[in-house]
Image (spheres, rainbow, N blue to C red):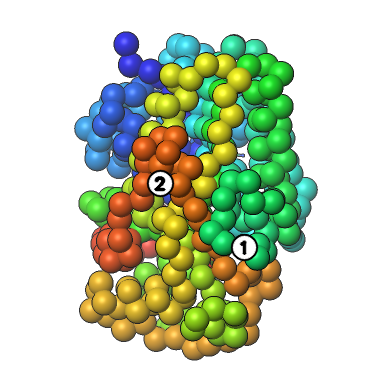
Amino acid sequence: MANRLLITGGAGFIGSHTCVVLLEQGYELVVLDSFDNSSPVASERVRELSGSQALHVLKGDIRNAETVNQAFRCRGPIDGVIHFAGLKAVGESVANPLLYWDVNLNGSRVLAAAMEQRSCRTLVFSSTATVYGEPEQFPLREDSPTAPIHPYAQTKVAVEQMLQALCRQKNWRVASLRYFNPVGAHPSGRIGEDPLGIPNNLFPFITQVAAGRRSHLRIFGSDYPTPDGTGIRDYLHVMDLAEAHSATISHLLKQDPCTHLTLNIGTGRGLSVLEVVRGFEQATGLTIPFEVVERRPGDVPRLEACPDQAEMTLGWRAKHSLLEMCRDGWTWQQANPTGYRSAA
Ligand code: NAD
Ligand code: WQD
C-alpha cells in the first residue's frame, strides 16, 4: 500500500521538484498551497512529468485550521508531511516581520495541531542555512551555533524548536532540513524557479539577464574576505534537494517515535558570485554583463555546508555539478521566458 503524504507549499520551487521525485517513487500526494508565490500550472506540469495521477491539489492557507483539516480528510489518512509552505524573502521579513511570524510560525503551529489531532507525527520541515547567521568557522556542521540575524531566520529557528519539543513530549519523528542555496531546474525545462517580480536571488537574476529580461547583473560587493572578494554560497541543484527529501521521508517512516534529525543540505563546495557567473557563461556560451556595486545589507561573506551528516544518516549526497545547475536553469528560462504566468 503506497504511503500518502501531505505536501504543504507543494506547488512552489522546491516543492514541485520534490513532488515529481515522490510521485515517480509511487507515493500518493496531497498538495496544499495558497499559490501566493506559485502557480497551479506547476502542479499540472508535475503530473505531466511524473505520468502519475496520484497528485491531488488543494488551494488554501496553512493558517486556516479548517483548510488544513480538509487536506487531511480529502484522500484518507496521511502517513507523513513535508512542510514547504512559508515565506522566504529576507528583506521582506525585515520590512514586515509580523507577516513572517504569522505564516512561518503560526502556520506551522496550525499544521502541527492538525497532525497531532490525527496522530500523524512524521514531518519533514524546510529550514534554512540562514539560521547560522554570520558564522566564522567552516564548514558549517549541524551543531554550529544558530544566530539568526533577521526575522525570516528567527521564524525558522522557532519552528525547529517547536518541533524538537514535539519529538520529546509527543513522540514525533521530525527532520529539519537546513537548505543552503537550491538553484537550477528539472532537466526537462517544464518546471523551475519562477520568482515574482525582480528576482532577489542571484541565479534567477542571471538567467533573466541571459534571456534579455534584465540589462545586466549587479554584483553586491567585491570587498568581502573571500578569494575574489565576492560572496560565497553553497549552491545545490534543486533535483539533488528533491532527492534529499525523498531519502528523508523514506528514512523517517522507518524510525521509532522520538526521532529528531537536523541536517545540512548542501554540497560542501562553496562558490563565489564570480565563479557562478563564469560557470554560467561556460555552460551556455553566453556573456553575462555585470557591474560591481555596494554590498547588500544583511548579506554575509560566506555560507558553506558540511553535508556529512546527511550522507551518513540518509546515504544522500549532492551529485549535480555547477555546469548542470546552469544548463538546467537556462533550459527552464529559455522555455518559459515569463515563468508559468505566460502559460496560465
Ligand atoms: P516558494 O515560495 O517557491 O514555495 C513556497 C510555497 O508555499 C509557494 O508555492 C507558496 O504559494 C506557498 N505558500 C506561501 N504561504 C503560504 C500559506 N500561508 N499557505 C499555503 N501555502 C503558502 O519557495 P521555495 O524556494 O520552494 O521554498 C520552500 C521552503 O523552503 C520555504 O519554507 C523556504 O523558507 C525554504 N527554503 C528555501 C530556500 C531557497 O533558497 N529557495 C532555502 C532554504 C529554505
Ligand atoms: C547569493 C549571492 C549575494 C543577487 C537567499 C535567501 C535566503 C535563503 C537562501 C531561504 C550573495 C549575491 C545576489 C544579485 C548578487 N533562502 N547576489 N547580485 O543571499 O544566500 O540567500 O537564498 O532560506 O533566505 O535570501 O542568496 O541568491 O540572494 O545571493 O551579487 O542580484 O549572490 O550578495 O553573495 P542568499 P542570493
Tag 2: amino acid: Leu
Q: As drawn, is 247 to the left or to the right of 258?
A: left
Q: Percent x, y for residue 181?
A: 48, 58
Callout 2: SS = helix
Q: As drawn, is 222 to the left or to the right of 28?
A: right
Give the number of the disc on residue 241.
2
Q: Nearer the viewer, residue 163 or 93?
A: 163
Q: Where 238 sits versus 328, above or below?
A: above
Q: Percent x, y for residue 336?
A: 31, 60
Classed neighbour count for the residue bearing mark 2: other residues with Cα under 10 Å, few (<14), some (14–19), many (≥20) = many
Callout 1: SS = loop
Q: Where 118 sits versus 128, above or below?
A: above
Give the number of the disc on residue 137.
1
Tag 1: amino acid: Gln
Classed neighbour count for the residue bearing mark 1: other residues with Cα under 10 Å, few (<14), some (14–19), many (≥20) = few
Q: Where 71 sits versus 157, above or below?
A: above
Q: Percent x, y for residue 300?
A: 63, 69
Residue 27 appears anywhere in the view? yes
- Between the C-alphas of marks 1 and 2, the distance is 24 Å
